[in-house]
Amino acid sequence: MKIGKKGLKMADAAVPQIKTKKKRGKRLLWVLGIAAVLLLAAFAGANFYLARSLPVTKGEIGLQGLLGSVTVIRDSSGVPHLKAKNEHDLFMAQGYIQAQDRLFQMDLSRRQASGRLSEVIGDKTAENDKFFRTLGLRRAAESSYKQYSPKGKEALQSFSEGVNAYIKELKENGKWPVEFKLLGYKPEPWTPADCLTIGKYMAFDLGGNWEDQAFRQYLLQTFPKNKAYDLFPSYPRSAPYIIGKSELNIEKSFAHAVTPFEYNGSNNWVVSGQKTASKKPLLSDDPHLGLATPSIWYQMHLEAPSVNVSGVIFAGVPGIILGHNENIAWGVTNTGPDVQDLYIERRNPVRKNEFYYKGKWEKASIVSEPIKIKDKKTIDYKVTVTRHGPVISEFAGESGKNTVLALRWTALDPSSELEAVLKMNKAKDWNSFEKALLKFETPAQNFVFASKDGTIAYKANGKIPIRKKGDSMLPVPGWTDEYEWKGYIPFNELPKTVNPSEGFISTANNKVISDDYPYHISNNWAQPYRQMRIQEVLKANDHLTVKDMENLQMDQMNLQAREFVPQFGKELKHIKSSRDKQALAILKDWNFIDSKDSPAPLIFNLWMQNISDVLLSKQIPEDTLKLFKGKKQAVDELLRRGLEGKPGPWVKEAGGLGKVLELSLEKTIKQAGKLQGEKMEDWKWGDYHQIQFTHPLSSVAPLNLLFNREAPFPVGGSSVTVQAAAFTEEGIVNHGGSWRFVIDLSHMDEAYHLVGPGQSGNVKSRWYHDQMDDWANGTYHKTILKNPKGDILTLKP
């Protein structure tokens, strides 16, 4: 077959085209290959750079200031075991080791509490800094230092010297943690006041009651009295003082206020030997705080001739605040007392720095707090402090014509909690431990205690005000002495029990004592479901073990659902929607366990959120609603009254309880459908309810890829289960058992811990996120006091 001229030309032309394509292909392969090599080189370079900042955990390091050598053994979970010949060396080494793993977190914590974030982040945190400058945690910490004994000051100073030794080392070798490089700054030297400022911040994080006072004031200024009282925890015992609606703008005053997380509570319990398999006490503690990278807690073991203690501490603070020694163990939950009062102050319309008190104009203190802003002009900020405390209603600008709100708070007074911590670390029995608590004034905590002699005990400890008048329900007049504090509940009269006949003591931020108690403690308590479940389990077993305690800390039984689901079903028995019926059928067959693999917890937990929205969100602005710390308890009460046939104004105005339930269920089904598809039987709680432990810098892309090592993954539980796992509107679990701890006092040299997500703040450390899965699954690690094994580092003078 012949090919014509035209065809021949086409064939001839194809030859160089084929060669050209091959050459282009080879070039492309070369380009891709070179790009891959460059990427690998860049990755290797970045990996090497990040790894440079890993701390030295083996060998020897010389530290100027040590009196003798200190042995540091890091076990398989990254827990450092420090052994020193004296307390100076012990605390200096503690500061050095904490800085090795957590220096950036420590620096960020002191900046947050001191109102100095904007210096390194920029104007995005200016309002945050204004708020903390107004509160004055740093000022309170600095004044507290004077309260410490020479021994306490020595511990603070030794710890600070250790931190500074590590900072000096970094300055010399340039191996800074990557966060400092990214933000372009180096930390200042550490001081004892920094330790105390972080301690004051934890008092803030564990909450107060001023937000609820402001919110109730807003209710009374905005709604009819009966409607406002419908959201109060109880009817006020005395008639509230109500200022005019135009006098104070609550919405504007606190639009940018930094408020602690609503669920900053905890669980703890202690069981006597009469109910345990070992015949010795068992103690469990799991403080519920923010879940992030790094953990709020840092686990350590400290040993010197005078002390041998193991447990956790806040990064940036010496000692061990929760844990055990060779004789005793202890844990805490938040008591949640009313330790704050908002005072309504009348300002002189002519001289704005004067306020009326008992017939005279009294001059307030003006504190200069200049706020440096990265790459921008310093803000000339000033704080007004009245006789009752700082004016907190104006940090975002003037909020009232001639009226402001000042905050009286126990944590703003000088105090010396670290003295208590150091004495607790050495206590040998209940008497010496309770004596140590004399110095633990703020925040007020529920301490549970056990000793190897078999004693179990509880004490609600801290400074709780006694008021001349009023019950801390609402802001009170500041121009009269009628509402002043006249002291604090005497130490020997604080709620306490030792070796109760029940054989156990448990707390979960629930009501501490009956109304017969002669002193006021709080208007708001946590929802009772965690405490009810803990007691339900402990009462049912007289041979409890460590494993039983771990299982209880991971318990996902939802008693709120057990209370409300059957009643909701009866209320909606005539509902017509097939989708609603299907959802109710799923709930009816539910075992009330908030399992990650079940659709029922998704339906119920979203339903409870939407009930709250249907009742409140249209009438109360979002920024004001965030002040309502008792919202969940209040909504529970609205529902109970509605189910009893006694609906209040909020339920009535929403169309009655049946309408509220129907509307919120429809919203829930639509919401879940958008999230997980139309097949209701395929819905899973864990596909929405997920944990990640996010790093503070991960909000800036692409740093999330660096610091958040894993994608969010499913977890069970909820905000009302013993396995606390509170979540955002996006379903991300950001609050829960930040540290879990169990000890059997028949073996005082060992205990079981979980520190999610891990011990280290260094992204390249093997202990950075190694406890994430453990946290979700309840896999504890054992920490021993005698002969720990691991990497050995010797610190020498």
Image (spheres, rainbow, N blue to C red):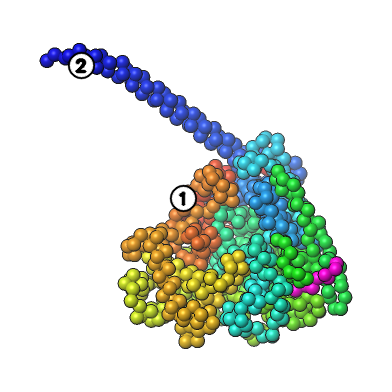
Q: Is residue 704 or residue 177 the one in the foreground?
A: 704
Location of residue 550 in the rendering, given as x and y in whole percent from the top left corner? 48, 64
Report the residue at 54% width, 73% height from top: 616
Badge 1 crowding class, 10 Å Cα cut-off, few under 14, some 14 to 19, many 20 or more, is: few
Examine the structure image and report whether residue 346 is included in the region drawn in magenta.
Answer: yes
Percent position of residue 747, x then y? 55, 62
Say whether residue 305 is left or right of residue 642. right
Q: How far is mark 2 from mark 1, CA to CA?
A: 60 Å
Camera-side residue of 71 and 97: 97
Q: Which residue lies at the image location 87% right of the left edge and 73% below the top edge?
A: 361
- Residue 32 is situated, as x and y percent measured from the top left of the image, at 42, 28
Residue 77 x/y as whole percent: 53, 50
Q: Is the C terminus in the top left, top right, bottom left or bottom right quadrant?
A: top right
Q: Is residue 523 above or below residue 202?
A: below
Q: Which residue is mark 1?
A: 711
Q: Return the mark for residue 332.
A: none
Earlier in the chain: of badge 2 and badge 1, it is 2
* Label 2 close to label 1 by CB (< 8 Å): no
Q: Secondary structure at mark 2?
A: helix
| Secondary structure that dominates the magenta span | loop
Of the two numbered discs 2 and 1 in the rendering, the one whose residue sits closer to the viewer: 2
Establish if 652 lies above or below 365.
Answer: below
Pick the residue in front: 554 or 86: 554
Which quadrant of the structure image shows residue 27? top left
Quadrant where the N terminus sits is top left
The type of residue carrying mark 1 is Ala
> In the displayed structure, does residue 585 sit left or right of residue 731?
left
Q: Secondary structure beneath disc 1?
A: loop
User: Measuring 73% from the left and 54% from the top, which residue is drawn there?
Assistant: 194
- Circle 2: residue type: Gly
Q: Which residues are magenta?
A: 344-351
Disc 2: which residue: 7
